[in-house]
Image: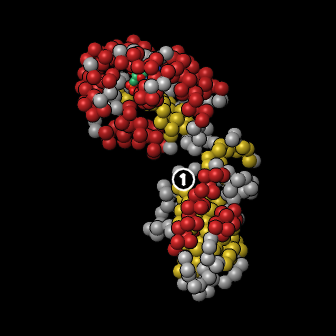
Amino acid sequence: MSNIKLHDKSFRPFIEYDKIENAIDEVAVKINKDFEGCKDVPVLLCVLNGSILFTAELMKRLKFNCEIVCVKLSSYVGLKSSGEVRDIIGMTGSVKGKRVIIVEDIVDSGRTIANLTKMMEANGATETRICTMLFKPNCYKLDKKLDYVAMEIPDDFIVGFGLDYDGLGRNIKDIYVLDTNMKYYILFGPPGAGKGTQAASMAERFNLCHISTGDLLRGEMAKGSELGLKAKALIEAGELVPDEIVEGMIENKFNTVEGVNGFLLDGFPRTIAQAEALDKMLAKKGTAVTGVVSLMIPDEMIKERIKHRAAIEGRADDASDETIANRIKTYHGKTEPLIDYYKKAGAYNEIDGVGTIEEVRDRIHALMQSL
Ligand code: AMP
C-alpha cells in the first residue's frame, strides 16, 4: 500500500481493510451477546455520511431484528473539528419507545454523541447506547463510557472507510492517516544514560516506532541467526558491529512499519558514517532528521548505571569491567563526534539526564513538543 492524494493533501496507509473487518466482527459479537433474544426491535441510528459503510457492515452481522434510522449532522469542516455540531437534516424515522444504538464512524471530543443522546431522549427513545468504529481516547471529554468501540486511534486526521477529507475518500476501503511528514528523532547519549528507559514513554506519547539497534541485535543473537552470530563477539567485546548491518536494519524498519507518526532511533547512528547513511536514507524520502534528543549524564555516573542495569537485565555486555570500559571508549572515540555533526545541522538538543525517571521524562516530552 502506498500514499494517496486527496485534494492538496497526502495520506499514508494506516489500518488495512482486513483489520477493520476483524474489529467490526468483534464489536458485532458483543452487540449480539447483549441483545440476544430481545423481544423489542432496537434502532440503529446511522450518523450520515461518515458511518454509512460502518453501519452497513455492522448490520450484516447482527442476528436480532433491528431497524435503521439515519440522521445527518456535521462537525468537521476540512481538517479541524469546527467545535459546533449542526443538525443538518432530521431523522428519517421514529425512535419513540425504542432502544437506540447510535452508530458513529468516529468519536473524538464526544460533542456529537452528547448532542445525539439528548436528541434521542427528546424523541422518546427508551435507552441510548453508543457504538463507534473509531475512538480517539486522548480527545474524549465526556464521563460517559462508550458501549461498543471497534478500534482506538491516536489524535490524527484520517480518511477512508466512510470518512472523508472535504468530500473525498469515503469510498476507500482501507483507512489512511494524514501524512504530516513523518518525524525522525534520534535519542542520543552515552551507554547507561537512560535511553532505553525513556524511549518507551516517548514512543507511546508521540506514537513513534522505537527502534533500538541494540535490542534488534540482541534479538538476532537470541535467535542464533547468522547476523546474530556475527554481532555476538563484537557486542560482547564492547565494539561496534559493522555499519552496513545496522543501516540495513534501520532502512528495513523505515520501509515496513506503518501506523506511526514517526521513528525514535535509539543507539543509531553511532558513527559519522552511519549519520551520513541516515541522511541519505531520509533525503530519498524528501525529509531529514527532525531532532536529536541528547541525554547527558556525567562520566562517573555511566559505570554506576551500567552496573545497576547488569544486575536487573543480565546483559552480557554489561557484565565485565573490561567490556564496559571498552564501550565507554568506543562512545567517546566514535559516537561523541556526532554531537558536532548534529550541532552543525542545527538538530542537536541536550537534556540533563540526571534526576528521577519522571523528571527526565518531563524534560524530554517538553523538548519534543517544541521540535
Ligand atoms: P545498546 O543496547 O544500544 O547499548 O547496544 C549494544 C551493542 O550493540 C553496542 O555496544 C554495539 O556493539 C551494538 N550496536 C548497537 N547499535 C549499534 C550501531 N548503531 N552501530 C554499531 N553497533 C551497534
Residue density around tag 1, few if under 14, some if 14–19, many if 20 or more, within 10 Å: some
Which quadrant of the figure has residue 189?
A: top left
- Badge count: 1
Q: Residue at x 40, y 15 (%)?
A: 234
Give x and y (percent) for residue 274. 52, 19
Q: Residue at x 67, y 78 (%)?
A: 67
Q: Residue at x 30, y 32 (%)?
A: 313
Disc 1: which residue: 153
Mark 1 falls on what kind of element?
loop
| Residue that protrudes farthest toward the front in the picture | 224
Task: Tell me: is circle 1 under 8 Å from ligand 1.
Answer: no
**Above or below, comparing residue 341 to residue 92 in the picture:** above
Q: Is residue 344 visible?
A: no
Coloration of the structure image = secondary structure
Identify which residue, 142 or 22, lies in the foreground: 22
Identify which residue, 229 or 285, lies in the foreground: 229
**Above or below, comparing residue 370 to residue 339 in the picture:** below
Ligand 1, by image quadrant, is top left
Viewed as shown, does residue 329 lie left or right of 269? left
